[in-house]
Amino acid sequence: MKTNKNIKSFDTHLTENYGNVGSKTRDKFEEEFETFKIGVLIQEARKRQHLTQEELADKVGTTKNYISRIENNASDIRLSTLMRIIKDGLGGNLKLSLDI
């Protein structure tokens, strides 16, 4: 079996492309990636529950367009809206952690 010697760890990739941990560029990437993950998590949960974006939007009092923008990382989301989507729309609980 051949191995590719050009394969790098994800951390090495991030360092080479976005700088060291703590740099402005790396911090910006990591912040945007967290926002992206939230959208993906909402989309996956919505699909598991066989809900359309419009059905989820109706449950939480927003629009299909807004749900789409969240799922596609095109919109910032307020914490209160995120909590409504998770609790009222998806029947879940939001757990946050803080790393300092």
Image (spheres, grey):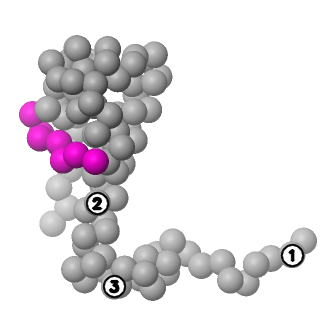
Q: Which residue is mark 1?
A: 2
Q: Residue at x 18, y 19 (%)?
A: 60
Q: Which residues are magenta?
A: 74-80
Of 56 and 93, nearer the camera is 56
Assign the magenta stretch its main secondary structure: loop
**Which quadrant of the figure has residue 94?**
top left
Q: Which residue is mark 2?
A: 32
- Nearer mark to the viewer, of 2 and 1: 2
- Nearer mark to the viewer, of 3 and 2: 2
Dot placed on the residue nearer the N-terminal end, 2 or 1: 1
Q: 81 left or right of 94?
A: left
Q: Which residue is mark 3?
A: 20
In the rendered view of the protein, which quadrant contains the N terminus? bottom right
Q: CA distance from mark 2 to mark 1?
A: 35 Å
**Which quadrant of the figure has residue 22?**
bottom left
Q: CA distance from mark 3 to mark 1?
A: 31 Å
Dot placed on the residue nearer the N-terminal end, 3 or 2: 3
Q: Residue at x 12, y 40 (%)?
A: 79
Circle 3: residue type: Asn
Dot placed on the residue nearer the N-terminal end, 3 or 1: 1
Circle 1: residue type: Lys
Q: CA distance from mark 3 to mark 2?
A: 16 Å
Proximity of marks 2 and 1: CB atoms separated by less than 8 Å: no
Of 83 and 29, nearer the camera is 29
Task: Give the answer, above or below, for where 11 lies relative to 61.
Answer: below
Q: Residue at x 36, y 48 (%)?
A: 37
Q: Does the magenta-highlighted stretch encompass residue 54? A: no
Task: Give the answer, above or below, for where 19 lies relative to 30.
Answer: below
The picture places residue 69, in percent across and down from the top left corner, at 29, 39
